[in-house]
Image: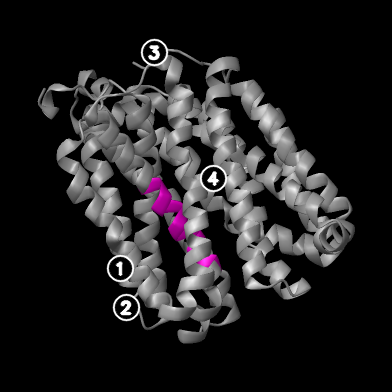
Amino acid sequence: MPLSAYPASVPNSPRFKATATLCWLGWVFDFYDLILIAFLVKSIEADLHMTAYQTSWMLGIGLGASGLGGIIFGWLADLYGRKKILSITVVLFSFGMLITGFVNTPFEFFCARFITGLGLGGEWAVGHALIAESVPAEQRGRWSAFLQSGEPLGVALAALMGFTVAPIIGWRVVFMLSAATAILVVFFRSYIQESPIWLKSPKKSSKDRILDLRLFFTKYWPYMFLAFILAFFKLGTYWTCYTWLPRFIQESFGQKIGQSTLWILLGQLGQFIGMYTFGFMADRIGRHWAFTVFSLITALSLMPMALFWDFLFFKQQIIFWALIFTLGFGSGCTAGFGALLSEIFPTAQRTFAMGAVYNVARGAQLFAPMIVMWAVQRSQINGALLVPTTFALLTAAWVWMLPERRGIALD
């Protein structure tokens, strides 16, 4: 049977596999890029002669731009289709990564990171909406988890590149090589088929779309607010653990690069397994209970480290590494946002709402390291780890504020 004969909505069809692969790879390199900065920060600030103030914004500019990108490209995907805008976002963040390797001043660097962040923000919502609208309702949770599972692989790849490859070839070449993600669009584009649900939705003029958006906000702003708070708590748990902790351990406790790499890889292995487990659990017992169980696992992993860090880190290495693995496993509930958000918002504004909620919450993580450093000044590592612990507990409680819509038909 020719490839064009397969509908995108059949999960075992070649067309759907091509679509899911592109979305998944886009998410791998999405997180790879955002985390890579944390491992290259010293080399970049030295080469570009950045001040301490400029360095503090190095990670934040990409996160902040991703919030704007989620809003812009989410709206465009609702207007012009998921397939076309998905390709544009992947090419855009690949272009941003490419020109990052050629910058010579801090201003040029921030401009390149802004372009990259725009593409990254748009890619998440468009990819998740496309997959959610193309799979059977009873499998939506596990397919959402599949897409998000690119996150731990992206972080692991960033750790390997940042710790082992970048010192050899330099940070500029690392960014240039990373821009090869644009080739994915060229390879997969002809195999990707548009969302069947979006194709069936009524097409309206721009004027009517703006009116619909006003009506959407009138009805759905409480859901957007509640979902934003949930995403802020859950992503806050993640970013307060993974953006500053590896470097803090290196500088404060003299941990070697090899140990830091192993620490990150073990956590990402746990998260990878946790995401797939979460996806099947969310389809079986619902989004609420799955989020709650995994967030409590995260909190229970962080509490012993927050209370007994010195004892575990220096004297009980086996327990310490086990806690790192379970911390990653609990972080697997990040995989639930694609299904959860797609089931709350209507087709006409789905990618706009998903992109705005998730990426604005991710952009707000610019302030997460600042909160942690304040806690470090007050109570050192113990106080700092209580920040993500608190976020994890808040995630477990707050998810119940949103409606449970497991298995509903998207229309």
Q: Secondary structure at mark 1?
A: helix
Verify whether residue 35 appears in magenta.
Answer: yes
According to the image, label 1 marks what residue?
A: 98
According to the image, label 4 marks what residue?
A: 361
Question: Bounds of the magenta span?
Answer: 26-38
Tell me which residue sits at (44%, 23%) in the image. Answer: 140
**Measured Cα–Cα span from mark 2 to mark 1:** 8 Å
Amino acid type at image mark 3: Ala
Mark 2 and mark 1 residues within 8 Å of each other at the beta carbon: yes
Image quadrant for the N terminus?
A: top left
Amino acid type at image mark 4: Ala
**Measured Cα–Cα span from mark 3 to mark 1:** 40 Å
Q: Position of residue 337 (x, y in %)?
A: 51, 33
Give above or below for 209 relative to 403. Answer: below
According to the image, label 3 marks what residue?
A: 409
Displayed quadrant of residue 265? bottom right
- Of tags 4 and 2, the one toward the viewer is 2
Give above or below for 387 relative to 164. Answer: above
Reading the chain from its start, which is encountered first: label 4 or label 2?
A: 2
Amino acid type at image mark 2: Phe
According to the image, label 2 marks what residue?
A: 102
Q: Can residue 117 be spotted in the picture?
A: yes
Apparent side of residue 409 relative to residue 222 in the rendered image (left or right): left
- Of tags 3 and 4, the one toward the viewer is 3
- Of tags 1 and 4, the one toward the viewer is 1
Reading the chain from its start, which is encountered first: label 2 or label 3?
A: 2
